[in-house]
Amino acid sequence: MTKVLVIDDEAPIRLLCRVNLEAEGMNVIEAADGPSGVEKARDEGPDVILLDVMMPGLDGWRVAEQLLEDNRTTGIPIIFLTARAEFRDRAKGLDIGGVDYVTKPFNPVELAPLVRDLVHRVESGERDDLRQEKVAELRELLERD
């Protein structure tokens, strides 16, 4: 069973993620802030992390940096949840080491297939390919503007 850690300071967003991912047979763990998210990632070893960028105190960028610097959590793929769809923010997420991003408001029904596909591709050794695809998508967006 796929284990997903949702780190978001907004309870309705965590609930939305939980309901939709559990409906698809996934195990969901929640954290309401950055520090508890880092702790749960270390303790629980989730298959994937959905990480909000805009959180008070320890924001998503710094949480991601801590997770990627820790041997216990460095291999866990991170999907950023962000209300900020600007190119710069998406690029920063990928640059830090995130594998994907979802822009809020998002369609909760699309979450489980995204997570399932991501976990499958990372397990198949395609993590770098995935990130390169996202970087290529961002380049295309940049060239269109």
Image (spheres, rainbow, N blue to C red):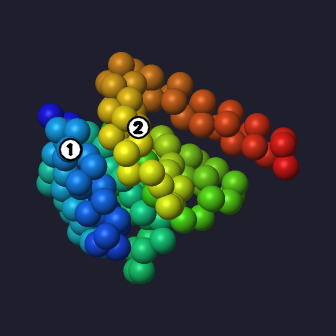
Residue depicted at x 15% and y 34%: 1
The image position of residue 95, as x and y in percent, is 58, 48
Spot occupied by residue 9 in the image (x, y as percentages of width and height) = 34, 73
Label 1 residue SS: helix
- Residue 85 to residue 36: above or below: above
Which residue corresponds to the image point at 39% horizontal and 58% vertical from the top-left? 51
Left or right: where 29 falls relative to 10: left
- Residue picked out by circle 1: 23
Circle 2 residue: 114
Rendered location of residue 87, percent (x, y): 69, 54
Tell me if mark 2 has few (under 14), some (14-19) or many (20+) residues whose alpha carbon lies within 10 angstroms of its own.
some
**Callout in the foreground (1, 2):** 1
> SS for tag 2?
helix
The image quadrant of residue 7 is bottom left
Tell me the amino acid under the disc marked 1.
Answer: Ala
x 24%, y 55%: residue: 18
Give the CA distance from mark 1 to mark 2: 14 Å
